Amino acid sequence: MITDEDLAVQRVIQMVKEGTVTAITGKVIPVQADSICLHGDSKKAVLFAEKISSALKDAGIRIRPMGEQR
């Protein structure tokens, strides 16, 4: 689990835009992510959700409900 918020945001945007993710080892791995998981049990979960939502929108990425087709 990534605890650095800025790094987590960067990796999510990388997954969506490039179809890859950078592992903790630095290796770039191809990935098809259809959703992201935010752990809601941390003290700053709501703030992080707002931060990642804003970052995705700023990057031109549309957030859709899980059941909506591409």
Image (tube, rainbow, N blue to C red):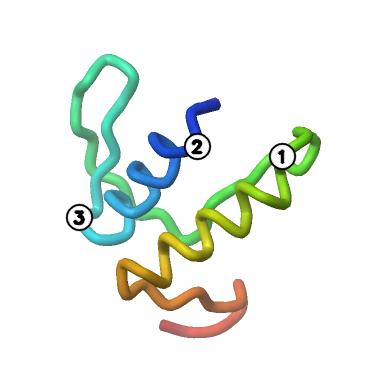
In primary-sequence order, the first of circles 2 and 1 is 2
Image quadrant occupied by the N terminus: top right
Q: CA distance from mark 2 to mark 3?
A: 19 Å
Compared with residue 32, is residue 58 higher up or lower down, i.e. above or below? Answer: below
For disc 2, the neighbor class at 10 Å (few under 14, some 14 to 19, many from 20) is few
Q: Amino acid at mark 1?
A: Lys
Secondary element under disc 2, as helix, strand or loop, is helix
Q: Which of the numbered marks, if any, corresponds to residue 18?
A: 3
Disc 2 vs disc 3: which is toward the camera? 2
The x and y percentages for residue 66 are: 60, 72
Secondary element under disc 1, as helix, strand or loop, is loop
> Which residue, given by chain and number where applicable, does mark 1 sit on?
44
> Which residue, given by chain and number where applicable, does mark 2 sit on?
5
Secondary element under disc 3, as helix, strand or loop, is helix
In primary-sequence order, the first of circles 2 and 3 is 2
The x and y percentages for residue 28 are: 19, 32
Disc 3 vs disc 1: which is toward the camera? 1
**Residues tagged 2 and 1 counted as in contact (Cβ below 8 A):** yes
Q: Amino acid at mark 3?
A: Glu
Q: CA distance from mark 3 to mark 1?
A: 28 Å
